Image (spheres, rainbow, N blue to C red):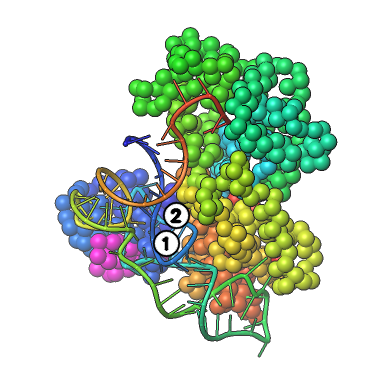
RNA sequence: GCGCCCGUAGCUCAGCAGGAUAGAGCGACGGUUUCCUAAACCGUAGGUCAGAGGUUCAAAUCCUCUCGGGCGUACCA
């Protein structure tokens, strides 16, 4: 509950003056006040159970006494904005003036427009967000979608809260696998194939390597050797690797562009190669890194974790080494107040280990590092795996979704201009929303039917509602006036809409703080469904001018909030569809 | 084996810093368009919130155990 809410302010202020409350401060009262589940019960409520201990009275009695004390014998509310105060069981319910509530909410949205919901909480603070971070030399598959889409939404959410955001695509462009690739390319690859469909060719080599390695154990050794050469700066290895990276990025960027996802940096794992030794030396000097089974590790027995591997027996670095190094670099470079790693939950242990190492190194900022984990995307047949060839390419999913949108447009709105662009916006929107609309930590089953469903609680539903609102505004044709007769908004759904619109800023804060875009998704679905119900039962534009102005303002505010919300999720908002 | 995560309607999922009667969507069945976009709306059917204990005035929500599923568990990332 925001303290700027004049209704709450009045209620809290008045409650404080009640001797029956035993001298509670206003700031203690705020968190106690809640919203009743059903608006018929009131607009705000004070559950009296928590006061039982303090006042040594049954909660029902507390509620009753407070109601009596405030309203008194007259039964009339002495407050400005509150019209009725009523005890109902252990709840003290407050009814406020709905026209004043509408005024307060709608005037603000009308005034703030695209900025409604934004805040300045994060002013002067930096949030580093590490997201997407795919391995190069492979296609982006559906299971790469989650990190990218969640990270992008968090980036936008934190930015809206006033934080300076740094988006980093920590590309998986270093490690033994590139040794494998180099070996495979030298043995079976050709420049010509690489030219035709570069990433496809590289992926083919990767798969072939793993097939062959089953029969020929020496291949793995050759790969390790090749990676070590790469790490030591061998020219030929370096050139090959750079080529692999270039063609991969070219393909990735096509997908990122389609999804509307951007990064401030593409500093992948290789970026830290030069700094690695320095980090390792410091770990050694601090007595943290020790040799075990020929490998350099940080022993974490004390913390009930397996050791954190820093260097293999052949001296080559590992991803934990590069993560420690990258974290140090980012702390130096950006001075973040928070750093988010949007990485799958299968890497939980890795993050616990590597955060522990940072802690042992004495970095106070480790407490600001968060592993924003998420569940796997699975098929009915099991986990997706590049090696097993059990993948669906992200490009393919996007293509199918856009095609589906195109088909629906052709069927429902064949005269739509810019149909191709809108099909793209809607198709992509469906995919993004489908991914964001379940809680992060749950595993999700990839189901074409779900992803390509455009009815019900989906991205297109939100976009459709937005387009419908835009259409109403076009039909209205005049500028929206913020000064209307708010007492004309008497319908229950109008009241529900106003309340919902009011809570948009809180929904953003909650979504950002819990790193759960689903909070905002649910909010928008609820908002859209209240509006659609309202729309189906009442006319916005009518002969009654006063009523029309009031309803148009309400509709326009709904349009505005839908638009702001969709943008925060990284979705586009077509004005017709 | 050990650690972490998950278990809510046939399916996919909300609700989980405890609060008033467990909610949506999909699928099924039935209905709504002389009127602002029917990608919408309304209705019907569908639940021992995995199970058992515990804490509490109050538990889907917190704690413990059991069962079921997933992931991880030293030289991959």
Q: Are marks 2 and 1 in contact (CB under 8 Å)?
A: yes
**Residue in the foreground of this view, choosing between A485 and A473:** A473
**Residue in the foreground of this view, choosing between A351 and A500:** A351
Q: Is residue A325 above or below residue A145?
A: above
Which residue matches tag 1? A81
Residue A238 % position (x, y): 73, 22
Name the secondary structure under disc 1: loop
Question: Which quadrant is the C terminus of chain A positioned in?
Answer: bottom right
Q: Is residue A525 above or below residue A55?
A: below
Q: Is residue A159 above or below residue A214?
A: below
Horizontal side, residue A477 vs residue A320: left or right: right
Residue A16 % position (x, y): 30, 50
Horizontal side, residue A167 vs residue A73: left or right: right
**Distance (Cα) linking label 2 and label 1:** 8 Å
**Is residue A313 highlighted in magenta?**
no
Dot 2: few (<14), some (14–19), or many (≥20) neighbours within 10 Å?
Answer: some
Nearer the N terminus, badge 2 or badge 1?
2
> Residue at left 62%, top 48%?
A391
Residue interval drawn in magenta = A72-96
Residue A548 % position (x, y): 62, 74
**Residue in the foreground of this view, choosing between A397 and A408:** A397
Instruction: Have a look at marks 2 and 1 and say if they share a chain.
Output: yes
Residue A281 visible here: yes
**Residue in the foreground of this view, choosing between A79 and A272:** A272
- Work out which residue is located at the far front of the displayed protein and give it: A215
Dot 1: few (<14), some (14–19), or many (≥20) neighbours within 10 Å?
Answer: many
Residue B19 % position (x, y): 32, 59
> Residue at left 53%, top 25%?
A320
> Residue at left 83%, top 36%?
A192
Which residue matches tag 2? A6
Residue A331 visible here: no
């Amino acid at each position: 509950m925001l303290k700027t809410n004049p209704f709450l302010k009045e209620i809290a202020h008045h409650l404080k003056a009640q001797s029956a409350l035993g001298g509670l401060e206003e700031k203690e009262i705020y968190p106690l006040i809640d919203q009743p589940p059903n608006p018929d019960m009131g607009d705000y409520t004070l559950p009296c159970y928590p006061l039982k201990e303090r006042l040594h009275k049954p909660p029902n009695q507390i509620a009753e006494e407070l109601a009596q004390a405030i309203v008194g014998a007259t039964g009339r509310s002495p407050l400005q904005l509150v019209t009725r105060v009523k005890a109902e069981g252990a709840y003290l319910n407050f009814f406020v003036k709905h026209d004043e509530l509408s005024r307060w909410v709608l005037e603000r949205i009308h005034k703030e427009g695209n900025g409604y919901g934004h805040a300045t909480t994060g002013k002067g603070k930096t949030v580093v967000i590490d997201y997407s971070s795919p391995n190069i030399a492979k296609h982006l598959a559906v299971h790469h979608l989650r990190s990218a889409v969640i990270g992008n939404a968090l980036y936008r959410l934190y930015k809206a809260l006033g934080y300076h955001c740094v988006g980093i695509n920590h590309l998986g462009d270093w490690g033994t696998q590139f040794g494998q690739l180099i070996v495979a390319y030298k043995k079976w690859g050709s420049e010509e194939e690489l030219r035709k469909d570069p990433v496809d060719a590289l992926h083919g080599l990767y798969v072939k390597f793993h097939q062959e390695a089953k029969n020929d154990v020496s291949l793995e050794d050759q790969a390790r050797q090749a990676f070590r050469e790469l790490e030591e700066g061998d020219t030929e290895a370096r050139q090959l690797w750079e080529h692999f990276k270039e063609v991969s990025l070219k393909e990735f960027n096509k997908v990122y562009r389609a999804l509307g996802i951007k990064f401030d940096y593409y500093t992948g794992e290789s970026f830290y190669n030069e700094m690695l030794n320095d980090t390792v030396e410091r770990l050694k000097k601090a007595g943290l890194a020790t040799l075990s089974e020929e490998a350099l590790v940080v022993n974490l027995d004390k913390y009930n974790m397996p050791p954190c591997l820093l260097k293999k027996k052949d001296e080559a670095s590992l991803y934990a080494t590069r993560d420690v190094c990258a974290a140090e670099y980012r702390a130096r470079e950006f001075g973040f107040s928070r750093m988010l790693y949007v990485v799958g939950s299968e890497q939980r242990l890795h993050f616990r280990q590597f955060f522990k190492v940072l802690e042992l190194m004495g970095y106070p900022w480790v407490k600001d590092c968060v592993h924003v984990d998420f569940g796997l995307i699975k098929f009915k047949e099991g986990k997706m795996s590049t090696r097993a060839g059990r993948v669906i390419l992200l490009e393919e999913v996007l293509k199918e979704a856009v095609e589906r949108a195109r088909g629906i447009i052709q069927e429902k709105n064949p005269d739509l201009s810019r149909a191709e662009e809108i099909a793209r916006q809607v198709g992509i929107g469906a995919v993004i929303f489908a991914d964001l609309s379940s809680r992060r930590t749950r595993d999700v089953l990839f189901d074409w039917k779900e992803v390509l469903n455009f009815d019900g609680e989906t991205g297109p539903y939100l976009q459709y509602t937005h387009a419908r609102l835009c259409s109403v505004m076009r039909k209205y044709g005049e500028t929206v006036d913020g000064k209307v007769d708010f007492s004309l908004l008497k319908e229950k759904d109008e009241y529900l809409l106003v309340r919902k619109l009011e809570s948009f800023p809180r929904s953003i804060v909650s979504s950002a703080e819990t790193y759960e875009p689903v909070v905002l998704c649910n909010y928008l679905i609820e908002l859209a469904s209240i509006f659609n119900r309202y729309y189906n039962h009442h006319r916005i534009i009518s002969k009654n001018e006063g009523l029309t102005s009031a309803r148009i303002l309400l509709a326009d505010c709904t349009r505005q909030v839908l638009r702001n919300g969709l943008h925060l999720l990284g979705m586009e908002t077509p004005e017709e569809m």
